[in-house]
Amino acid sequence: MKLIMSDLRDKDLLLQFTLRLGDDALILGHRLSEWCRNGPFLEEDIALSNIALDYIGRARMHYSYASDLSEGEKSEDDFAFLRECRDYQNFLINELPRGDFAQTMARQLILDVFYTLQLEQMSQSKDATLAAIAGKAIKETKYHLRRSTDWVLRLGDGTEESHNRLQAGFDAIWGYVPEMFEQDEVEEKLVKLGVAVNTKDLKPEWEKQIGAILKEATIDVPQQEWTVRGGRAGFHTEHLGHLLSELQYMQRSYPGLEW
Amino acid sequence: MNTEDTADLEQAFQIRIDKEEKIEPKDWMPGEYRRNLIRQISQHAHSEVIGMQPEGNWLTRAPTLRRKAVLLAKVQDEGGHGLYLYSSAETLGVSRAEMIEALQSGKAKYASIFNYPTLSWADIGAIGWLVDGAAIVNQISLQRTSYGPYARAMVRICKEESFHQRQGYEIMLSLSRGNQAQREMAQDALNRWWWPSLMMFGPHDADSAHSAKSMRWKIKRETNDDLRQKFVDQSVPQIDVLKLEYPDPELKWNENRGHYDFGELDWDEFYAVIKGDGHCNRERIQHHVKAHEEGEWVRDALKAYDAKKKARHAA
Ligand SMILES: [Fe+2]
Ligand SMILES: [Fe+2]
């Protein structure tokens, strides 16, 4: 950061926040890449791989910035591959297994609406690098949102089976939504410094947009009966460990090599 | 139409071919030419699609983020190639659903090399370098194939293929400059993928069921053995750069021929793997069937939604 933060502690906060954004992107990108060769038809294999690529690119930009912030002490790949489960701070919703195509699309819509709102503001961040990354990401996310909206409408108003699957998809993951709109001390401080986005403020607009799309798709907005939180504190679901054991396999088996 | 007319048409058709004119979908063509093309193009399309599986097997285990992104982009391209090729086959009057059905029932084939398993990260390097490398040699020659839509698909595909081969060779280069374990991994991958890559060009010309006619109709432009030789000639110097051992003790430059000599291929293995003795024959098809069946409700939903929309529009 062309520092508005001279304070060392603030710089640690910035590093932590940057890693969170990297983790969000990496873990979701990884999940989406699992669709490659498993999609319902070839065009979807290609489209989902494309979106996965956008997120992996986003992860790389954040981790390489984190590497700068760590004064080169760690590389992009050190951050991606060589941390423990508890060190990752992504939203829990991003690490959930992909489920069926309906559940994947439900998650994408939830996140795409969230990111269009969040990235718009992040692109105004006082941290020039994070702002620039967001500025690039927002263009991708607008396209992602068009796609996930289309799919939610098609599945919701398609056949009885697709409708039921989509409803079940939203129901299954709805309890992971609230933490996206909560902020711990780290983020609160960064919001005050004009670096992070106060996602709490985004919730009404998010609810409005999601509500409108679900209504058109004839899907009920799930009743908030349960809430699981903890991603930003590294308090993960059991799924993340398995994801990491694949993701980290090479780096763990052959430490310190060039590939 | 009587046989005389057909004979005239066939003669006129051959004259066009001999003049290097491209045959387009609406042009008259012999039934056998059409069937031959459908067989070849759909087999080519299936190979692109089935080929996504062995490489996809390493998408979640790529060693760095850059490699992960490059591999994903590569596998995605192969899906795109499958699409172009299905579309060019469709211009001959066969539907994608029919082609997929033929693949899944075993009636249509795909490149048998994809029945081999990917066991280490080096296999991803070897596939890009050798398997895509062999595919390029074949596809460059097919840019001049007589059927217009197929030739144009090849031009488009060849542009992307050189990136595929480069990324594979780059993986091999990093491994060859790495430690003992990495060099062993690279050597093992080269040893396992070398012969199957040579087999990709098919049987010797004398034993090739479709060769003669395909050559006369210029569906094929160069013989299996000529293409194989080209591939060997381009690959051996690349092995030298990697400082790996030759996977074939008979590989040797022949001054007189101006080509590398190489050992005889194990044709028993070739036919055995085609017939089902490969490690992954069953998995490849089962995987394709599973994804296809799991996607059925999605495709149904899409159709139902479009129909509703049309009905609303009409109302
Ligand atoms: Fe290809
Ligand atoms: Fe390729």
Image: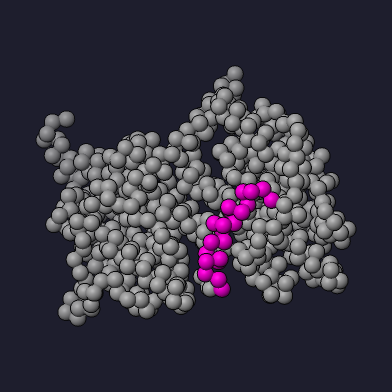
Outermost residue toward the left?
A: B4
Residue B220: give x, y in percent of width and height.
24, 54
Q: Residue furthest bottom?
A: B255
Name which residue lies at 71% across and 38% down.
A174
Magenta segment, principal secondary structure? Answer: helix
Of residues B22 and B140, the one drawn nearer to the viewer in this rendering: B140
Q: Is residue B23 visible?
A: no
**Residue A248 vs residue A175: left or right?**
left
Vertical comparison of A8 with B52: above or below: below
Query: Where on the picture, by quarter, is residue B241?
Result: bottom left
B24 horizontally vs B255: left or right? right
Q: Is residue A246 magenta?
A: yes
Answer above or below: position of B141 versus B148: below
Q: Residue furthest top?
A: B315
- How far from the left and from the top, in percent, is residue B180? 44, 76
Where residue B252 appears, as percent x and y from the top left, is 23, 77
| Image quadrant containing the N terminus of chain A | bottom right
Residue A38, compared with residue A10, is above or below; it is above
Q: Name the residue rendered at 49%, 59% in the picture.
A: B71
> In the image shown, does B131 or A176 lie closer to the viewer?
A176
Q: Is residue B190 visible?
A: yes
Residue under the point 63% across and 52% down: A240
Pinpoint residue B111: horizontal percent, then vertical percent: 31, 52
Q: Is residue B147 above or below residue B308?
A: below
Q: Is residue A240 left or right of residue A176?
A: left
Q: Is residue B236 magenta?
A: no
Q: Residue at x 25, y 41 (%)?
A: B35
| In the displayed structure image, the side of residue B161 where residue B269 appears, left or right | left
The residue segment tinted magenta is A236-256
Indicate the colouring scheme: one colour
Q: A138 or A259, which lies in front?
A: A259
Query: Total marks drawn?
Result: 0
